[in-house]
Amino acid sequence: MLGGGHGRGCTVGCSLYGDLPHALVEWVTMLIVTREGDRRCKLRPSQRAVITPVYLREHTTHAKLAAGFWISEGTAHAYVPSVINILASKAPSLTQACAARPEFVLVDGTTAECDRVGDHERDYSGKARRHGVNIQAVTDPAGELIWYSPALPGHTVDITAARTHHIVTTCEPLRIPALADKAYTEAGGTFQVPCNRHLGRPLTTRQAAVNRAHAPLRCPVERAFARLKARRIFRKARISPNRLTSIAKAVLTLGTVRKTV
């Protein structure tokens, strides 16, 4: 039973996250125990290993989590960020993620909407026309996630985000081609983007052929964002955008571990 003894946590844990692999729960439980020891808490490590993925996937309010796990709302507020930070600390760096040296990687960015903003201008994405944060994804050729970036203010354009996160300078020495869309034009390094029209002139036959070959190779990156947006917290977060960096890292850790357990 995922929630623990006396039925506590079973209602929320099983109904909202019934497909959570038992091996993943065990891994997160051991991570919590290793980091915190066996100190007394109102929820056992196995229960906290469930309540946090529930929150990350369903973006359930702390009040509902508290009711489902028979704890106070304040306790839920304390446990969830604590486990998120533990998971975030285990997230691989981009260099570590690229250690397998894939044939090439796919790079793209998205805006994760957030309804609580500190700076309306910095957090507003003109492209997405909403407030939120910019998150970059790097995947293998099949669209399997390799790395999610920390969150940047929503007004950050993709090429600036790629440079800020050192995606360009990480792929170049590893000689890993990075396929991206036109938003990354002039990124340099090993980035390969579609050909642009120059001064309104039509593309040459060769340029058009290159673009046709490039598009289907780049499409699988959308799978990474589909998985990201499957977690409701990235659709419209009800938290400070500053917290989305640790949350993105925690999700990256869960995704990386889930493929191995």
Image (spheres, rainbow, N blue to C red):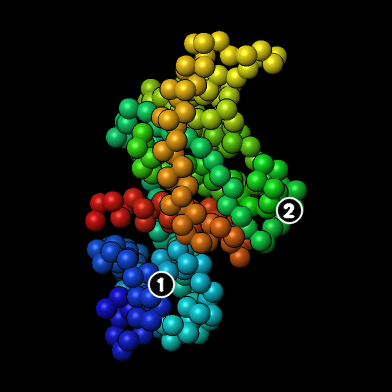
Q: Earlier in the sequence, mark 1 or mark 2?
A: 1
When asked about the image quadrant of residue 22, the answer is bottom left
Nearer-the-camera pick, 170 or 51: 51
**Disc 2 designates what residue?**
119
Q: Nearer the viewer, mark 1 or mark 2?
A: 1
Q: Is residue 249 visible?
A: no
Q: Position of residue 90 (x, y in %)?
A: 38, 53
Residue at image point 46% right, 57% down? 230
Q: Is residue 219 left or right of residue 117?
A: left
Q: Is residue 154 left or right of residue 248?
A: right
Label 2 amino acid? Answer: Asp
Secondary structure state at the residue bearing disc 2: loop
Residue at image point 71% right, 57% down? 118
Q: Which mark is residue 16?
A: 1
Location of residue 133 with respect to 60 vertically, above or below: above
Q: Is residue 215 left or right of residue 3?
A: right
Q: Is residue 125 left or right of residue 167?
A: right
**Alpha-carbon neighbours of circle 2 within 10 Å: few (<14), some, or many (≥20)?**
few
Secondary structure state at the residue bearing disc 1: helix
Q: Is residue 130 visible?
A: yes
Cβ–Cβ under 8 Å for marks 1 and 2: no
Location of residue 44 with respect to 84 vertically, above or below: below
Location of residue 135 with respect to 83 vertically, above or below: above
When asked about the image quadrant of residue 164, the answer is top right
Location of residue 9 with respect to 159 vertically, above or below: below
